[in-house]
Image (spheres, rainbow, N blue to C red):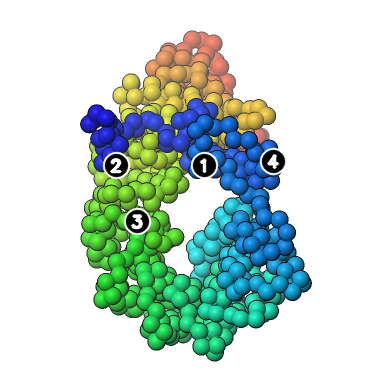
Amino acid sequence: MPEYITKSFSPRFSFPQDPTAAHYMFHDDPYLMPKNSATARLFSLSKESGRNAAKYIIKEFPHFFDKILAEPNIPSLMPEICTPQIEGVSEEALRERINLRMVKASVDLFDQLLQAGTSISLETTNSLLDLLCFYGDGESTQEKESEEKEDLEESEVNASEQETPKRPPQRGSHPFASRWRENNNAERIFKIMPERNAHSYCTMIRGMVKHGASAKAYDMYTELLNDRHKADVHTFNALITAVPFLKDRFLERWELIKMFLNHMAQQEVQPNVQTFNAVLKTLRRCGGVGRSMAVPVIKEMEALEIEPSLATYDHLLSIFYRSADLASSGIISEVLDDVEKRSFTPQDPDDAKFFISAMQVCCDLKDIKLAYRLNKAVEKGDNWKFLDMDRLNSYWSRFFSLLCMMEQIDVVLKWYKEMSPSLFYPSPKNILDFLQALDAANHLEMIPSVWEDMKQLGFSKRRDLLEEVLSLMSRDQHPEEIQLAFAKCAEDIKTVHEQSGRDQASVEWTGSALGSVTVLFSRAGRTQDAWSMMERFQQINRIPTDLVMDEFLNCAKQTNSPDEAIKLVKLAASLGLPSSQKLKSRVEKEFKLSENQKKALESIQSDSDSSDSDSDSDRD
């Protein structure tokens, strides 16, 4: 094989990236090219949902897929055999159903074997307990596993750090409803086991912790000790993660953690990186106690020559940078010193959270140098694999907000062109930050291109973005070329407000938006468009500001349109505005009026004048 082809397979070899291209997963179907992060997530989930639907069909109707037509046959690409091949009531049939993860069928067959008086080996019974404790006595489905994962993540985010919450949870309860039923099949089978070993107890403890029965898990651990068994490292890890649900006070939590660690030493159980991650994860919910003990825990890891994983650093950052009073950049700087040197492999489910958390800390500290260091760490080795599409978008979104806040506009523009949409889809907040950066650098001529991006991203009806764009474009006077470009944007925004239809919800006009569009049309010399906007003030019961009326009058003067100027005076008079007399005098002085136009102007009388004259006549 030629050398250039083999080199192309190397992970270090990379082709030039197209910044305008979407994620590679969408290239198969042009219809699924997303416009923003929401549709990107929807489309990616729809693809995964399709795969799950295909697996479900194969599993439920295997007789439709019994013919293998592939030549040559590649077993890894063929549908898995999901139907039992062993018939009858036997321990071999039970083991087969356990391996196929058929929860209900396994329990039914186990009960049939017991009724028949057949003795079942301890190994097979423990395998059944493993299955029941993993799936929580329910059927094995990918949807259920994903729901459990989302519930766990949500509970971690919403967990309170206060030592005395308003509604203290019961001992051993999780923030979400426990999924461990009372006297379920796992408990029933465990109780009737004629013989139990350490594996039996450890499986029950881990299952109870996983499904929210922390108090029962602790009681089961006590039974394990009473029966003079030893727990394994995975069981201790599970018990340590359950500590926040067993104790309410921070100091009590730390004492319970120390007790478990002492038991590990007494039982000669060697801790691993997940053990220390579990300790740090619990210390995240121990307030000041957690901050005081986190560093000694890291030093203990070093003493045992256990390399931290990304989850270790994620927990460490959460402990020191979670409160409103942020610590100095010393901790994260030391963390990045270690992360920059290594290419990590997954060791903990929380590893994938590190890069997003670290970038958020950089944003909170407003430290762009740390963000650049973190970005280099992402690019080292296979570290980028920890960022899936959702996390990648969140990571770059935070990085871009920090760039807008701290960097020069040329650097911001360079990153924006390289990042969107190949690496991330800007969020509404990113667009607001970008507009503020352009404003601070006096580069408002870039707004028309930003508006085009907003339309492509589907943000053209976001009221906060519309108000910001219009406010920036109408605030100051610009050269004619820029004003014409701004007027074109204003025309698009006017169309957005006027769209109507079954599938299109129109955006209601606000006084500020109406005034800004009028000003932009006026400065571009589009008198008729500006006057059509002036008429809308009366239609929606809004009052134009003096600036809006002065800009329109200047436009009428520039385009030599005295009729529109007289209409403006009539509008101001009909609204009873104090500035109507000032506008009237300006029209008389600055415009060449015909006799008919002079008479029409002289006949205009404001509501305030007419009300004054009415009161005078009443007085007479």
Indicate which disc residue 75 carries.
Answer: 1
- Name the residue tied to disc 2: 11
Task: Examine the image and state in which quarter residue 542 appears.
Answer: top right
The three-letter code of the residue at mark 4 reads: His
First in sequence: mark 1 vs mark 4:
4
**Can residue 584 be seen at all in this image of the molecule?**
no
Question: Which disc number belongs to residue 345?
Answer: 3
Mark 1 or mark 2, which is nearer to you? 1
Q: Amino acid at mark 2?
A: Pro
- Residue 416 visible? The answer is yes
| Pointer 4 residue | 63
Along the polypeptide, which appears first: circle 2 or circle 4? 2
User: What's under tag 1, amino acid-wise?
Assistant: Pro
Position of 5 with respect to 21 (left or right) is left
Q: Nearer the viewer, mark 2 or mark 4?
A: 4
Report if the CB atoms under discs 1 and 4 are less than 8 Å apart: no
- Does residue 311 sit above or below 402 in this rendering? below
Classify mark 1: helix, strand or loop. Answer: helix
Q: Quadrant of the N terminus?
A: top left
> How far apart are the alpha carbons under marks 1 and 4?
17 Å
Q: Secondary structure at mark 2?
A: loop
Q: Quadrant of the C terminus?
A: top right
Tell me the residue at 38%/51% (across/down).
386
Q: Between label 1 and label 3, give the one nearer the viewer.
A: 1
Query: Which numbered disc, 3 or 4, marks the residue that appears first in the sequence?
Result: 4
Mark 1–mark 2 distance (CA, rounded to whole Å) = 27 Å
